[in-house]
Amino acid sequence: MPKFHLQFKNSLPDYQPYLPFPSNSNLLVPGGLFIDPCFPSSLLDLVSPFKGSPPSKNTACVSRRQKRESVAVKDLFFLSVSLSSDGLVSEHKECQLQNELNKKNKGAVAQVKQKVRVTRRGAVNTTKHLWAGAIAAMVSRTFVAPLERLKLEYIVRGEQRNIFELVKKIALTQGLLGFWKGNLINVLRTAPFKAVNFYAYDTYRKQLLRLSGNEETTNSERFIAGAAAGITATVLCLPLDTIRTKLVAPGGEALGGVIGAFRHMLQTEGFFSLYRGLVPSIVSMAPSAAVFYSVYDMLKSAYLHSPEGRKRIQNMRQMGQDLNALDQLELGPVRTLLYGAIAGACAEVATYPFEVVRRQLQLQVQASKMGALATGLKIVEQGGIPALYAGLIPSLLQVLPSASISYFVYEFMKIVLKVN
């Protein structure tokens, strides 16, 4: 038989019949060795650590009736012996279970801490992302508030005068601040709306890209992400838009501001009056957001894949930290403003009739409430197809700078806030 060496750490010098291991020792835990029946019995004598002891039932194993308390295991060790066709191979493995348990516990704690850190970083990044969109909306809406006021005059009040006459009228009757009438509620509505819109679009687009496994987002994925972002923002922010429309409508001054208008609508028309026009709003915002974000992304992608765009990205990487926030814009300041304006114009022209119908629905009272289709037909009957585009020119004059500024400020704030 081939010769082999078997080593037991801290094995007992003498045989102890009923207590193989003292309670105050760090010794081997009794175990078993399973051998094929073809091996001779002399092999068992070689492997047994209690060689030379009188045969007893207790020498083979510890009695099942023995109390577990009789063996206090502090550090546990194992010895493994493997048999091969070439002979007997011994492998001495020492494993401290207590240390392993400690390592596992430390590993679990480290994993939990890592998850907490990742969650915190994700929450901070989400907050920065939302703030970037909100600040973009605040700046752009305040800048174009006079044009927004003119658009609402045409849509809500049915103004028939040309733009210059309307500007003169507002300036004479309400003064310069009249052009910013309702701007606070407009900012309060637009800031969360744009914040949710920008964040939702980027989130949906990244999720679709990950699901598809493509290297770059496709145009169809951009449209889907934009539409989903528009729906999400509309459902969350429509009540503020409804209140704002009430305030700028005839008699809105008597409602006493945002809180007064909110209470009046709840008391007289119920909670769901805040969501009046939800369906046409979704029908309007879904394609509008789809066109707006997808057109900008397509223009941006086309430029970045062009020779000029590749060269600009390469120069930016070489400059590294020496670039300021404006120079870090991938498209550059001018091109960012231009592409934002083009995207906004495309979205406005494509969805403007839905906007007109939505505004009219928000002004209806419960007694004379009509559906979206009936309202659209009524508008066409009273003013023809051009009535669905009433106020489009001032709306475009408002959308072009608004969209360009909002995208410029959004991209700029993402760099300043270090949004991932």
Image (spheres, grey):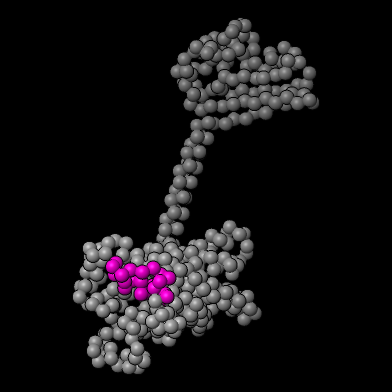
Residue 45 horizontal side relative to residue 334, left or right: right
| Residue at horizontal 36 percent and vertical 91 percent from the top | 163
The N terminus - image quarter: top right
> Which of the two residues, 245 or 95, is positioned nearer the viewer here?
245
The kind of secondary structure the magenta stretch mainly shows is helix
Q: Which residues are magenta?
A: 355-377
From this view, report whether residue 160 is shown above or below residue 102: below
> Which of the two residues, 362 or 306, is positioned nearer the viewer here?
362
Q: Position of residue 274 (x, y in %)?
A: 32, 65
| Residue at horizontal 59 percent and vertical 24 percent from the top | 9
Is residue 236 visible in the rendered image? The answer is: yes
| Residue at horizontal 56 percent and vertical 17 percent from the top | 12
Residue 91 horizontal side relative to residue 381, left or right: right
Residue 370 is a magenta residue: yes
Residue 364 is a magenta residue: yes
> Which of the two residues, 255 or 57, is positioned nearer the viewer here?
255
Residue 396 horizontal side relative to residue 29, left or right: left
In the rendered image, which quarter is residue 358 located in? bottom left
